Amino acid sequence: MNDEAKPGIDKTSPLYNTDPFMDEMGILRVNGRTANANHIPFDARFPIILPQQHAITSLLLGHYHEKYGHANRETVVNEVRQRLYIPFLRAAVDRAMKNCQRCKTFTPFLRPFTNVGVDYLGPIDITNLRRNEKRYVAVFTCLVTRAVHLEVAYSLSTESCIMAIRRFVCRRGPSTEIFSDNGTNFQGACTQKYTS
């Protein structure tokens, strides 16, 4: 869109590229690429623009943070973006999370790796004696401290996944929650019954 179509918006403004418009209720909204997606709700097609450091914005972000169980930043960011456009959203969510009294009270008393996310990276080609083989790495990330623990997974099978998780638990202690991307090996490890 040319500059004539954006009167009063400075080029350095975070709103310059959002092509803002005012709806019939006088609410400032984004007019972006999602405008043509007729199968999604109106608020998702035209998100409401809110200032980053306004008191209402802080209250809304605190509400989303509590509504989704004091979840990590990216969960809150994803849910907020379904309806709202806030410039520099991640920084605003971080501020809201730092002001959460429940998180201040309980988070420091959780040991590392109480809540973890797990994913695989690889394959990595290795040489075992004279054979070339593929190995994977199970990456366990603490959702509080962002600490990382790595375990070798010999394949993408459920059994290999279980063994990597068991080695992790033996080293770091049992986790309350483990989040994954629902790969078939993680689903198999979750549903398979085995004795510890």
Image (cartoon, grey):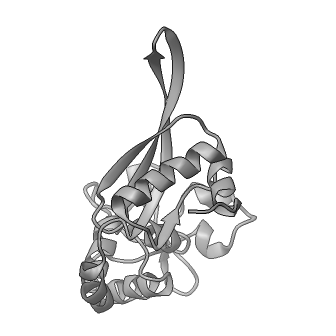
Left or right of 154 on screen, residue 140? left
Q: Residue at x 42, y 54 (%)?
A: 168
Residue 169 or residue 81, whichever sits in front: 169
Q: Where is residue 50 in the image (x, y as percent from the top left)?
A: 39, 77
Q: Which residue is drawn at 29% across and 57% down?
A: 147
Q: Is residue 111 above or below residue 31?
A: below
Residue 154 or residue 68, whichever sits in front: 154
Tell me the quadrant of the picture where the C terminus can be found: bottom right
Q: Is residue 165 above or below residue 73?
A: above
Residue 191 or residue 26, whichever sits in front: 191
Q: Where is residue 40 in the image (x, y as percent from the top left)?
A: 70, 67
Q: Is residue 183 above or below residue 178?
A: above
- In the image as oriented, which residue stretches furthest toward the front? 195
Instruction: Report which quarter residue 169 is drawn in.
Output: bottom left
Q: Where is residue 111 in the image (x, y as percent from the top left)?
A: 29, 73
Q: Position of residue 193 (x, y in %)?
A: 69, 62
Left or right of 145 on screen, residue 35? right
Residue 48 or residue 185, whichever sits in front: 185
Question: Can the viewer see residue 183?
Answer: yes
